[in-house]
Amino acid sequence: MSSVNQPRTEPTGTPLLEADGVSIQFGGLRALTDFHLSIRKGDLQGLIGPNGAGKTTAFNVLTGVYKPSSGEVRVAGKRVNGWLPHQINRLGLARTFQNIRLFRALTALDNVKVACRAQAALQVEGVHLGAKVRGAMHNYRDWWRAFLLTPGFMAEERELTQQAERLLEVMGLLHRRDEEARNLPYGEQRRLEIARALGTRPKVLLLDEPAAGMNTREKADLMVLIRKLRDDFSLGILVIEHDMKLVMGICEQITVLDHGETIARGAPEQVRSDRKVIEAYLGDNYLETHGGAA
Amino acid sequence: MESSSAPSAMPGVPPVLRGILPVLLVLPVLALFAWSMEQSPFATYLLSIMGVNVILAVSLNIVNGMTGQFSIGHAGFMAVGAYVAGVLGLALKEIAISGLPVAMSDQIFLFVALLAGGVVAAACGFLVGLPSLRLRGDYLAIVTLGFGEIIRVVVQNTEAFGRSLGLSGIPQTAGLGMVGFWVFLVVLVARRIAGSSHGRSLWAIREDEVAAEAMGVDTTGYKVRSFVISAFFAGVAGGLFAHFVPIINPGSFTFVKSMEIVVMVVLGGLGSTTGAIVAAVFLTLLPEMLRSAFTSMGAEGSLAQKVDQIRMPVYGLLLVALMLLRPQGLFGMREIWEVLPRWLPRRRKGIQ
């Protein structure tokens, strides 16, 4: 197992995604407290914890769905507190969803093309009025090109199709190209979501329970696939997962959450024998009755 | 699902022309048609009303169908266009461009007035849409409903717009040619949106806004843009309307009119352009069909004249029947050629 855990591409460079003391509060409920995280290129990290521990909340804060109450999220070195999800996405942070959220009535190809297109569109930097007006003018001009079917626009469309087809091929879904997303089997929907996320050309990929509902065989395939993606697309990957075998099998570093607090962090072996982690997963009196670390 | 609109089906056409070729082709056909219909004023009137309704339904379908938002103030934008174009038409009534035949300079002025009406309506759409489209869910419905009423009340109390009496004496220059041209244009625009990557992003917003946002789609921007385009064509439809009916007054642009357009879109199938067209044509003809049916049944006088009042309950019944029998509308999200019987030649699914 330890040879598997050796990263093939050594994590390098500055952190692409950083959470620095991030807390989030809903009314009186502290959903996440003082959360730290740092993901660099080539990282493969896990985020685990019992139900309701705040894992998905952490994802939502990182991707901009929620605004942190305190602390700072940095993507590619930029502070993104209060940014909209699509702006954060364009800095190179893509995600999948725990409960699959595909565009159900669109074909597999179109699902990926939506993501590819958004990435190709102009990124409006800055929040002052001038930049906004310039961005709006550009966007309306872009629609004109679609109405007039300019050669440049047609070429872009073909380019998008090819890009999306390549991604479908990587995820083994090319034969489902023209199938509506809602008609795909469950496992393929999960893979399509990953393909769609890759369409935004991310630097960091967040996977929210990618193995949920998969059988053992599919899980094994998924483990291979995740590692392959990390290497082929030179990504940093953060995985939320309930399946211990999968997390322990592929992640080099694991963060454990419980009630919004980080209770452990480290290599899989380290985390597995951590007293607090065992308490969180198996209850307070497990250790008393069984004695010592598991 | 939607795929790009057949650009490869035009081999040998220089790429520069591809975009505007359909427009150039349709113009002489429309001119011929308008000329041939000159002898029958009632048919001309009915076809014009039909055309205006088609423009309204197809443009509303861009917001309600493709983007999945719910706007119920389309008559408000129509009113803006109608009054702006109407006032402009009145102001330009006595002027003609020298060196051109009067009919042609009339059409040019009409076109300018329509554009002005459309642009002002689009600006209103932008102002209404920008704050309300940031929110999710039903807020847009409430805001657009309020907008429609505000416009009506403002018009009712403005001297320049003739208060409750309305504007009369607007030059009756909008012929079938002009109406047909705009019908054609709105359908072309709607189809090209649906087939382009912009349309795909709109579909994505309709399907799952959170996911679309997470995939880098600027959802607010896209919603505002679709709303602005939709409002523009509603304004143009209003301008056309003002240029062929003898009088426009606030009573033509009430909430009932907005609902009529929504019914057309829902009946045709949310997201289906051809569905919106078919439904608009059908619902325009429905009162006339009822009228002639009543007359032929011998209900002279009272009942036949009350068709306009009977219309609304009939719409209601129609909707109830539709929701029970075919909740997705006539064509659902598809276009007519995708639901036609199999023995008809079909357009191939997917992209070349």
Image (cartoon, coloured by chain):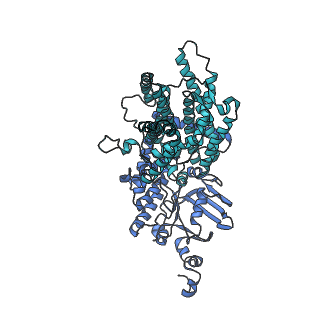
Viewer-proximal residue, B169 or B311?
A: B311
Q: Nearer the viewer, residue B217 or A265?
A: B217
Q: Position of residue A193 (x, y in %)?
A: 47, 56
Q: Is residue B91 above or below residue B2?
A: above
- Dividing the picture into quadrants, the one containing residue B17 is top left
Identify the residue at the far left of this view: B343
Is there any visible trace of residue A199 in the rendered image?
yes
Residue B187, how many percent across, how many down? 47, 36
Looking at the rendered structure, the number of numbered marks drawn on it comes to 0
Q: Colour of chain A?
A: blue
- Which shade of the palette goes to chain B? cyan
Whole-percent x, y for residue B77 in the image: 59, 37
Return the x and y of residue A219 as percentages of the image width and height. 42, 67
Q: Is residue A226 left or right of residue A67?
A: left
Q: Residue at x 60, y 56 (%)?
A: A65
As drawn, B240 above or below B197: above
Pick the quarter of the image with the N terminus of chain A: bottom left
**Is residue A117 something that shows in the picture?**
no
> Along the line of sight, which residue is nearer the eye, B80 or A142?
B80
